[in-house]
Image: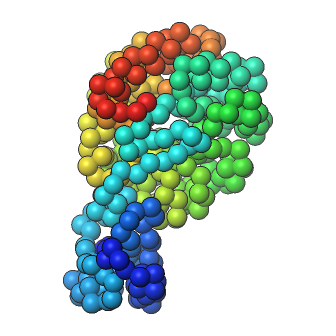
């Protein structure tokens, strides 16, 4: 349920509604940054919902109380009709803005990250991505540099001014990674790791939440709701391909997810064409398609020397290929009235 206040509702009337929600054993969550105050009512309702709506409708300053049929509340367009804009540093995602975060799959060394940052910044990327902790299918594969990798990211950020996006894998690592990162990435394998979602929800650092290989869109939005219910409203949803019967690529890119998610939620939607295809030859085409479909940003793997990358070299673009793609994306952004 949401309680929509009158445009001229006084602060004490808003506070009275929030207090009444608390008195009923529920939790109020006020929508930030909009002209008209909207208060979400969170928790298990122990009374008739229509009766509860009437109860709030009778309070001073209330325009109307509405029931929300979807299981998600804070991520719903009913609660927040306007597109949200999430900032990672100065990079804008959402509300007509489409930013690109790019860089290697893994942090391998300080020189490698310096060169990667120079490449992606010169081409027009607004944020630097790189994994210090890596979830790998094989226990014998490169697992990342850990805190040393985070320190490298922080050093490169200080040198270039680019905000950094990096993955957090466990609730026990949230405090550590949050100390260094400008954006916390939750990977596909952890999209329904609810302990991790709750821990990241307690931070106020922007989050890139990746869809799982077999996660339905409604379950994906519910994972975003976990983050928002904890108080973190700076959530970006990332489509990165799903597993189907088709095996010509690493995954099947669900372009449909972009407009479907936009109809369900106000949160920015980003496409990751690198993991969606798993092959660098296909990344530019899928990136262009995603931007044309209205995505609010792209997450692209770029490596100075993909053939010798510690992980995911096959899907990483080199510098010239990334520069060419960014030039193409600018033309597409102009054609579909987006700001890249």
Q: Give the residue drawn at x 52%, y 56%.
A: 197
Outermost residue on the front side: it is 8
- Kindly tell me whether residue 189 is visible in this rendering: no
Relative to 330, 117 lies left or right: right
> Foreground residue, 257 or 290?
290
Give the quarter of the image for residue 328: top left
Give the quarter of the image for residue 13: bottom left
> Foreground residue, 197 or 39?
39
Q: Give the residue drawn at x 47%, y 34%.
A: 99
The number of discs equals: 0
Relative to 168, 268 lies left or right: left
Q: Give the residue drawn at x 74%, y 34%.
A: 158
> Foreground residue, 179 or 280?
179
Q: Position of residue 49 (x, y in %)?
A: 25, 82
- Kindly tell me whether residue 87 is visible in this rendering: yes
Outermost residue on the left side: it is 50
Q: Position of residue 312 (x, y in %)?
A: 55, 22
Q: Give the residue drawn at x 48%, y 58%.
A: 233
Color scheme of the displayed model: rainbow
Considering only vertical position in the picture, is 160 above or below 280?
A: below
Q: Position of residue 297 (x, y in %)?
A: 43, 35
Quadrant for the N terminus, please. bottom left
Q: Position of residue 138 (x, y in %)?
A: 58, 30
Relative to 233, 239 lies left or right: left
> Foreground residue, 45 or 67?
67
Relative to 202, 42 lies left or right: left
Quadrant for the C terminus, please. top left
Considering only vertical position in the picture, is 146 above or below 204?
A: above
């Amino acid at each position: 349920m949401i309680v929509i206040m009158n445009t001229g509702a006084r602060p004490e009337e808003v506070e009275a509604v929030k207090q009444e929600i608390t008195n009923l054993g529920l939790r109020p969550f006020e929508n930030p940054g909009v002209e008209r105050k909207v208060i979400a009512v969170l928790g298990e309702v122990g009374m008739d919902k229509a009766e509860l709506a009437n109860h709030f409708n009778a309070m001073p300053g209330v325009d109307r109380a509405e029931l929300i049929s979807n299981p998600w509340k804070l991520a719903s367009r009913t609660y927040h009709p306007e597109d949200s804009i999430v900032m990672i540093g100065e990079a804008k995602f959402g509300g007509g803005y489409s930013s690109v975060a790019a860089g290697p799959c893994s942090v391998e060394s300080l020189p490698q990250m310096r060169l990667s940052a120079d490449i992606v910044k010169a081409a027009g990327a607004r944020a630097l991505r790189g994994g210090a902790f890596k979830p790998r299918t094989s226990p014998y594969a490169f697992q990342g540099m850990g805190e040393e990798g985070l320190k490298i990211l922080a050093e490169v950020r200080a040198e270039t001014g680019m905000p950094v996006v990096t993955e957090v894998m466990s609730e026990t690592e949230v405090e550590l990674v949050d100390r260094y990162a400008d954006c916390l990435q939750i990977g596909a394998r952890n999209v329904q790791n609810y302990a991790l979602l709750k821990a990241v929800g307690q931070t106020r650092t922007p989050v890139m939440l990746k869809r799982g290989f077999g996660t339905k869109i409604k379950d994906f939005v519910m994972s975003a709701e976990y983050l928002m219910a904890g108080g973190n409203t700076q959530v970006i949803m990332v489509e990165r391909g799903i597993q189907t019967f088709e095996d010509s690529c690493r995954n099947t890119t669900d372009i449909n997810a972009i407009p479907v998610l936009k109809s369900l939620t106000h949160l920015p939607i980003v496409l990751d064409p690198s993991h969606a295809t798993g092959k660098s030859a296909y990344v530019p085409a899928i990136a262009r398609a995603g931007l044309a479909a209205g995505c609010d940003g792209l997450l692209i793997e770029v490596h100075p020397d993909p053939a010798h990358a510690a992980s995911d070299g096959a899907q990483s673009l080199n510098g010239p290929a990334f520069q060419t793609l960014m030039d193409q994306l600018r033309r597409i952004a102009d054609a579909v009235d987006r700001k890249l």
